[in-house]
Image: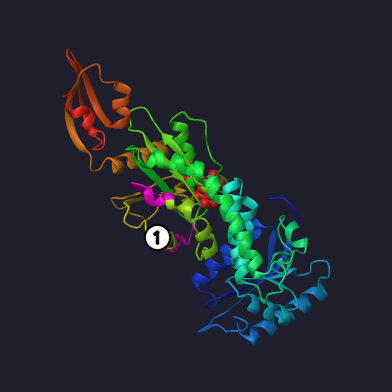
Amino acid sequence: MNGVFKRVLVVSVGKTNSLSLNHSQNEFSMLLKEINLQVVAYFSQDLDSIEKSTYIGKGKLKEIAFFCLTHNRNHPLERIDFVACNFELSGLQKKNIEEVVGAEVIDRTFVILDIFEQNARTREAKAQVEIARLSYLQNHLVDEKAYYSQVTSGTGQNRGKGEKQIELSRRQISKAILKKKKELSSIKLSRRNSRRRRINNPIPKVCIVGYTNAGKSTLLNRLVKLSKEEKTVVEKDSLFATLETSTRAISVYGYPTFFLTDTVGFISELPIYLIDAFRSTLEEIKEADLLVQVIDLSDPFMEKEIETTLEIIKDLEADQIPMINLYNKYDLMGGPVNFLPKENEMLVSLLDEEDVIESLKFIISNITKNWEKTQLLLPYSVDFASFSKENYVINYVEKENGILYNAYLNPSFSYKYLNKN
Ligand SMILES: Nc1nc2c(ncn2[C@@H]2O[C@H](COP(=O)(O)OP(=O)(O)OP(=O)(O)O)[C@@H](O)[C@H]2O)c(=O)[nH]1
Ligand SMILES: [Mg+2]
């Protein structure tokens, strides 16, 4: 984390002292920290229904305005820079709240978009975030004459565009979105080709899914290392460290090869603009033969995070794909936990090498679940290395007229071997 922190007052909706409000406030403050915003105060309101013009009640807004005024008077060097709403506002609601509280207002979607913008590394991720931001902007214009800067001025390091005071009307934004989409489709072409090659390939495809910061990229990296490959991906203690999809072939001696894909992490209320813009990236999830959900066991709000992940998987129409759950970060639990894993679950610490091997075995046993266990005598002319990468060899004996394998046969490859028997 670099740069100077600015100060924010957070407004959330929820029951005072409830677990869900606590979770949502914690998570939001972590999101804000990613873009160098530090929380100085939390306000919340338990709403039965939202106030159309201001989302939360006017009385609460006046309370907030009074707090900001007093705080800024008493701490002139530590003024509150923004009021950050932990929900999505319409353009008009934002403007109305600003008028009452006398400070610039940002909402949850804006914050997540800012993090995505900051973390996008590839041209594809950058274009996707730009499309999401433009769509957000389009939906938040208060009128035709609204300025691009009205929504984008202020927080992260990427505000240059806003400061250019470019006036983008709704029509102009549509044009800009179209242009970006065109650019994106040409970038996608090469990825689509390699993806198509994988789809047509009978090598099993496994996709890692889960909440942001659970350890998904760590799993990919540890398995890449086991297969003696070099091409790792970014893993770090921050939210949305991964914004692009990376696929690696995991080929560990003694186990069948499979493709492993790491992708964007999820979060509750992931803005629809981002789901839409990242849909093609996330579509890879749909093509998997097996999903591996990585869960942060040490997170007190684990259940809610699992629920969110499952909702997004359902939204992506990938909920029919078999899934196993790795409850990760066991090392942070400080001793045994009261948790009985089900058949498709496992407790692990991906920082522990033995657990990484156990995770690999668990993935393999689930990939090969429906492969037929066979004894097969193959002549020496059949390549040993290919056979053991395509199938799961339990053991083998060298005989006079060939090798006698005890193996689980990948049904997509069996045609190559059964007629040689
Ligand atoms: N203590 C502990 N830390 C872990 C473990 N597994 C991963 N981490 C750490 O958790 C942080 C997040 O890991 P990542 O693999 O980047 O998480 P991710 O799920 O890819 O996160 P996003 O890309 O943001 O969605 C990193 O600092 C990891 O080193 C574990 O078993 N124990
Ligand atoms: Mg990651």
- Mark 1 surroundings within 10 Å by alpha-carbon count, few (fewer than 14), some (14 through 19), many (20 or more): some
In the displayed structure, would residue 389 be above or below residue 200?
Answer: above
Label 1's element? helix
Q: In which quarter of the image is residue 8?
A: bottom right
Q: Where is residue 371 drawn, in percent x and y?
A: 23, 39
The answer to whether 245 appears left or right of 78 in the picture is left
In the displayed structure, would residue 132 be above or below residue 213?
Answer: below
Look at 59% across and 65% down and name the residue there.
135
Ligand 1 closer than 8 Å to the CB at disc 1? no
Q: Where is residue 387 drawn, in percent x and y?
A: 28, 26
Look at 17% across and 32% down and name the residue there.
374
Query: In the rendered structure, which segment of residues is drawn in magenta?
Result: 284-306
| Residue 160 seen | yes
| Residue 29 seen | no
> Which amino acid does the dot numbered 1 rest on?
Leu
Asked if residue 295 is among those painted magenta in the image, a careful observer would answer yes
In the displayed structure, would residue 289 be above or below residue 180?
Answer: above
Asked if residue 9 is among those painted magenta in the image, a careful observer would answer no
Q: Nearer the viewer, residue 30 or 268?
A: 268
Find disc 1 in the rendering and name its residue. 310
